[in-house]
Amino acid sequence: MDRKPYLKSVKRAVVKVGSGVLTRKNGLNLNLIDDITTEICWLRKKGIEVILVSSGAIAAGLKKAGLSRRPDSLSQMQALAAMGQSSLIMAYEEAFARHGARCAQILLTRDDLTHRRRYLNARNTLITLLAWDIIPIINENDTVGVDEIKFGDNDNLSALVTNLTESQFLVNLTNIEGLYDRDPRHHKDAELVKFVDKVNSKLSAAAGSIPGFLGTGGMASKLTAAKKVALGGVPSVIASGFLPGVLKDVFSGKSIGTFFKPRPVPLNSKKQWIAFTKNPSGEITIDEGAERAILKNGKSLLPSGIVDVQGRFSTGSAVVLKNGKGKAIAVGLVNYSSEDLLQVKGAKTSSIETILGYKHDDEVIHRDNLVSAELLDEYA
């Protein structure tokens, strides 16, 4: 399969480098950082803007703290991240400076991207840096991260950043050659998958979920990231960061690593944000008529179709829609709080103002703010 047609229009790309590539047992792999920065500068000379998503802070902190393994407690991990982040960014600054290039550090939590205003502020900052010819280096803010606001791993973060910045390509550099049809750790005859049309359940089952020595995401998380950007119409590649000239080869269209084909009709940026960035705050159970109207006819959710409301949420929150069998059918942004919806469930739209004393909208969730589970499962 020829990759070049997918790459010829790429003007902005996200490059994610994992801990398994960036680190050695005794700290950061400075030689590899130098190689990666050299290639990124080569891409910039070709007219391609690059946003770097980099792991490695905790690994760098391990060396400073004199530890031989990742600790189990959250507070210790946060302390290591605080110790190592300065070393990581300094290594990049020195490496880029050798090419006359400048970089900037951005630390994000999921909370920064969950709120629409902060999401747009983060986007504007990144676009400004690129306009100033500065390379953004993004990492998860492990120092303050807690389970509720963590991305989970930098694979997921790289997919969200690709959407955030409207980048046209995602390159995920890891410590193996790409996706195999079976776990190569246990099957010597496992073969590298060169091309993926869709991330389906068979591929997900083949992917290992065991993280490396210093990382948090395995191949399964890399597949999830590829799926997310594919739904947005963006191709991606998983390849080994240890290959000399890997970025040059990938952007030249050479058949290395695993290439993931993008969805022909992409999900728009807002719906990607709803589907993948917003954490659902509650659930709404709907009747068969509402389910049919949403899935078959592309309609909005009205109060008359609501059977029950679970959880506490406010206007603008993301909620999961479930049918009478408890199956999730969609996710969307509500125009009313859970307290209001408990009062108007089953009622006609014309009765909203009479019941509540006001009316924001006719729709509980407008169709433009709904993403069906069928669409998301298209690549599952």
Image (cartoon, rainbow, N blue to C red):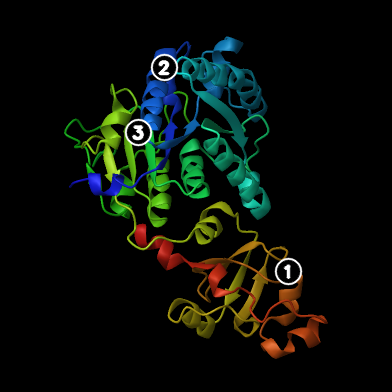
Residue 259, x across and y down, in percent: 28, 43
Task: Give me the residue at 65% from left, 45% from top.
Answer: 112
| Residues at marks 3 and 2, CA–CA distance in whole angstroms | 19 Å
Q: Can residue 380 be seen in this view?
A: no
Query: Which tag is nearer the camera, tag 3 or tag 1?
Result: 3
Question: Amino acid type of disc 3?
Answer: Lys
Q: Nearer the viewer, residue 267 or 294?
A: 267
| Helix, strand or loop under label 1 | loop
| Residues at marks 3 and 1, CA–CA distance in whole angstroms | 50 Å
| Helix, strand or loop under label 3 | loop
Looking at the image, is 72 positioned above or below residue 219?
above
Mark 1 crowd level (few <14, some 14–19, many ≥20, 10 Å Cα): some
Question: Amino acid type of disc 1?
Answer: Ser
Mark linked to residue 337: 1
Residue 96, x across and y down, in percent: 48, 20
Residue 249, x across and y down, in percent: 26, 31
Looking at the image, is 110 positioned above or below residue 230?
above
Q: Nearer the viewer, residue 273 or 280?
A: 273
Q: Name the residue under label 2.
A: 34
| Residues at marks 1 and 2, CA–CA distance in whole angstroms | 51 Å
Q: Which of pointers 3 and 1 lies earlier in the amino acid sequence?
A: 3
